[in-house]
Image (spheres, rainbow, N blue to C red):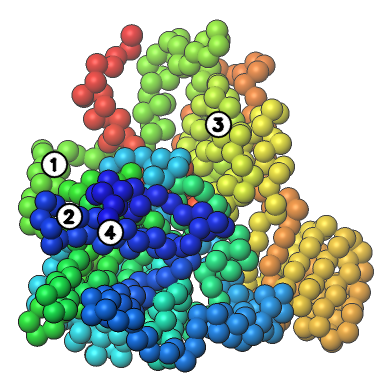
């Protein structure tokens, strides 16, 4: 027998599957007692899965019983071996290169289903994610009150789903609420055996499916559950293709810091390991031993076991200790149970309104927000800046790299640029990009946008083009303020896309749809098989053959227009900002009389995007009144004055 240290070493040492068997067994005396031993069975997932533990233990029991009686084990012949299954799988699935094969069709489904999925679901963690995951984990156990588990079962029956789907939908709501994301991916293991003849086999049959849910706080739980049911059923019907093949074909972002596609796993009623209740064989007693060193393959694994008339439903949250403390996970489990209770109690209510915090947490949060009522200022940020310009025109407003700018000059440059922006169509809530390095021009550009009534959307000159593209498209930016040094950032943008009825008013223009339609230049050539009507020639062309139109502007309407994507080369305009040269210091401030429409305190002043750790940036928009409220608070709390 090995020592306990040897058993621990065997359990914590990885496998080189190219040279080693994917399973190792160690036996050690547990303590000084002669009759107590620790049997450790350590296996690589390439060799066996969780469902294999029952037949494996059965084989051990059979062998032990026979050997203690001086006999050889009488193995029951297996009708098939794992090799037979592997051959069958290869023959049935076919080649991934064949789009008509089983694996080809299923890969097509997963390619479409997971398109655009954020790389990472960032939950509120206690520590920053390390660059390389250690895979160290811990378990936190909890129970479902009987009324909650009964409500899960009743909800499943009422809406024609399974208990798994109810728990999956509720978990998606929890993750959406915790992460402030609406695109939730949860992985789940499937047994992958399918036929009773495979049950006694030891091997790696389990597969992993990625279940994607779009969660809106305005949705009812009933509506979300209906979508989750449809998604889960589709996923289970495309479960033949191995997860590794999906990863290889879709090629998601690879990182040593997080798992691909999904960082949360949901397993429901997992198979028993080495006899949860223990096994008695004559004078031999076998019982499972808890292991302190728990591996965490993902950020969070949610394991739910259903109970019976005597035993309650139980759950385990296995979490990465790189990220979370046990107290955080304990609070998460409490919220999970509380949320399930609320969602199943009123499935027609909006999921965003479901109670997430407990009474103590609610009291704590309300206590933090308690304080005297503060009257929100009816002023605009531009009003405050204009007042400062008037009261101290000679004072220094900006200082950058040895250059001082007085309030008088600052106000004049801001208002001059603001009037130009108004002529470009900038008004209340209109988003204008700012792509200018830190300096006088950047501050003037921001205040000019606000003075015109618009909201500014800043992005750095070193921001990747695809990220800038996403921010521009999401915020609806049509104009970006730049300097000569930063104009190249906007020039890298691909033209924006939109759907619906398409009106093309200039050339060169390229229009793509279900059937390709290319408008190349003036004279304009239109190709396609859908009906195309050109009404502004005066020429009207209809038909299914190639048509050539020799004038522009061109208006495209009809069946094709519902699926068109329009690309226009100069969709995003740029305006170069320069604060060199003379300026008329008597330039009056911009007022509502100059603007396209009056500006009120609840109009947007800016939209800022987060770092995008979930795979795509998130925009947060603030109005004038919120910004001023924050500034007034800062002036009250911090020692800031004119000096």
Q: Tell me the SS state at disc 2.
A: loop
- Of 4 and 122, which appears nearest the observer? 4
Say which quadrant the C terminus sits in.
top left
Give the label on residue 510, or none: none
Q: Nearer the viewer, mark 3 or mark 1?
A: 1
Q: Tell me the SS state at disc 1.
A: helix
Q: Is residue 284 above or below residue 638?
A: below
- Regarding residue 355, the answer to whether it shows in the image is no
Q: Nearer the viewer, mark 1 or mark 2?
A: 2
**What is the CA distance from the residue labelled 1 to the residue labelled 4?**
56 Å
Which residue is depicted at the point 69% across and 84% down? 100
Say which quadrant the N terminus sits in.
bottom left
Give the label on residue 27, or none: 4
**What is the CA distance from the residue labelled 1 to the residue labelled 2?**
52 Å
Q: In terms of sequence position, does the residue under pointer 1 or pointer 2 come before the other? A: 2
Give the label on residue 30, or none: 2
Give the label on residue 445, or none: 3
**CA neighbours of label 3 inside 10 A, class few (<14), some (14 to 19), many (20+):** many
Quarter residue 461 falls in: top right
Q: In terms of sequence position, does the residue under pointer 3 or pointer 1 come before the other? A: 1
Q: In terms of sequence position, does the residue under pointer 1 or pointer 4 come before the other? A: 4
CB under 8 Å between callouts 2 and 3?
A: no
**What is the CA distance from the residue labelled 2 to the residue labelled 4?**
9 Å
Q: In terms of sequence position, does the residue under pointer 2 or pointer 3 come before the other? A: 2
Give the label on residue 368, or none: 1
Which residue is depicted at the point 26% across and 49% down? 3
- Of 319 and 214, which appears nearest the observer? 319
**What is the CA distance from the residue labelled 3 to the residue labelled 4?**
73 Å
**CA neighbours of label 2 inside 10 A, class few (<14), some (14 to 19), many (20+):** some
Q: Tell me the SS state at disc 4.
A: strand
């Amino acid at each position: 027998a090995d020592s306990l240290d040897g058993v621990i070493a065997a359990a914590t040492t990885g496998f080189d599957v190219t040279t080693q068997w994917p399973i190792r067994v160690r036996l050690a005396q547990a303590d000084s007692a002669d009759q107590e031993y620790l049997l450790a069975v350590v296996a690589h997932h390439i060799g066996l899965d969780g469902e294999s533990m029952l037949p494996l233990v059965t084989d051990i029991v059979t062998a032990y019983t026979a050997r203690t009686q001086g006999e050889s084990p009488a193995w029951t012949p297996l009708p098939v071996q794992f090799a037979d299954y592997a051959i069958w799988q290869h023959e049935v699935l076919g080649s991934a290169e064949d789009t008509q094969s089983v694996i080809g069709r299923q890969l097509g489904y997963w390619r479409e289903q997971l398109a655009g999925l954020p790389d990472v679901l960032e939950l509120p963690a206690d520590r920053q994610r390390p660059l390389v995951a250690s895979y160290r984990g811990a378990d936190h156990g909890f129970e479902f009150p009987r009324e909650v588990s009964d409500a899960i079962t009743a909800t499943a029956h009422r809406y024609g789903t399974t208990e798994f789907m109810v728990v999956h939908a509720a978990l998606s709501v929890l993750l959406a609420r915790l992460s402030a994301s609406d695109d939730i991916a949860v992985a789940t293991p499937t047994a992958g055996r399918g036929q009773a003849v495979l049950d006694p086999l030891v091997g790696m049959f389990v597969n992993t499916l990625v279940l994607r849910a779009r969660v809106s706080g305005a949705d009812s739980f009933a509506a979300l559950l209906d979508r989750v049911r449809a998604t889960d059923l589709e996923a289970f019907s495309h479960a033949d293709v191995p997860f590794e093949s999906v990863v290889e074909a879709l090629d998601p972002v690879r990182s040593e810091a997080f798992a691909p596609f999904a960082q949360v796993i949901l397993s429901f009623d997992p198979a028993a390991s080495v006899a949860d209740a223990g096994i008695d064989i004559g004078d031999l007693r076998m019982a499972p031993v808890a292991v302190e060193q728990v591996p965490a393959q993902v950020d969070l694994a949610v394991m739910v076991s259903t109970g019976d008339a005597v035993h309650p439903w139980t759950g385990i949250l296995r979490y990465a200790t790189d990220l979370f403390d046990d107290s955080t996970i304990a609070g998460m489990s409490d919220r999970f149970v509380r949320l399930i209770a609320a969602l199943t109690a009123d499935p027609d209510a909006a999921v965003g309104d479901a109670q997430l915090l407990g009474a103590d947490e609610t009291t704590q949060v309300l206590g933090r927000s308690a304080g005297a009522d503060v009257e929100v200022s009816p002023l605009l940020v531009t009003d405050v800046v204009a007042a400062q310009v008037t009261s101290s025109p000679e004072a220094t407003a900006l200082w950058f790299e040895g250059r001082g700018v007085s309030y008088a000059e600052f106000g004049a440059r801001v208002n001059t640029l603001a009037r130009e922006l108004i002529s470009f169509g900038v008004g209340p809530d209109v988003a204008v990009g700012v792509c200018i390095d830190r300096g006088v021009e950047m501050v003037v550009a921001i205040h000019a946008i606000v003075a015109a009534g618009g909201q500014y959307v800043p992005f750095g000159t070193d921001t990747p083009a695809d990220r800038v593209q996403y921010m521009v498209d999401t915020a609806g930016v049509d104009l970006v303020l730049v300097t000569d040094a930063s104009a190249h950032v906007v020039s890298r943008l691909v033209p924006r896309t939109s759907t619906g009825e398409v009106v093309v008013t200039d050339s060169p223009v390229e229009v793509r749809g279900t059937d390709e339609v290319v408008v190349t230049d003036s004279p304009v050539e239109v190709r396609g098989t859908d009906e195309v009507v050109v009404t502004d020639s005066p020429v009207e062309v209809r038909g299914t053959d190639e048509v050539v139109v020799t004038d522009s502007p061109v208006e495209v309407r009809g069946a094709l227009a519902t699926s068109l994507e329009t690309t226009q080369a100069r969709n995003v305009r740029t305006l170069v900002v320069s604060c060199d040269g003379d300026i008329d210091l008597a330039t009056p401030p911009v007022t509502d009389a100059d603007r396209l429409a009056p500006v009120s305190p609840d109009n947007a002043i800016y939209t800022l995007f987060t770092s995008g750790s979930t795979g795509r940036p998130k925009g947060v928009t603030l109005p004038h009144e919120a910004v001023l409220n924050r500034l007034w608070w800062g002036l009250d709390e911090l020692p800031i004055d004119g000096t």
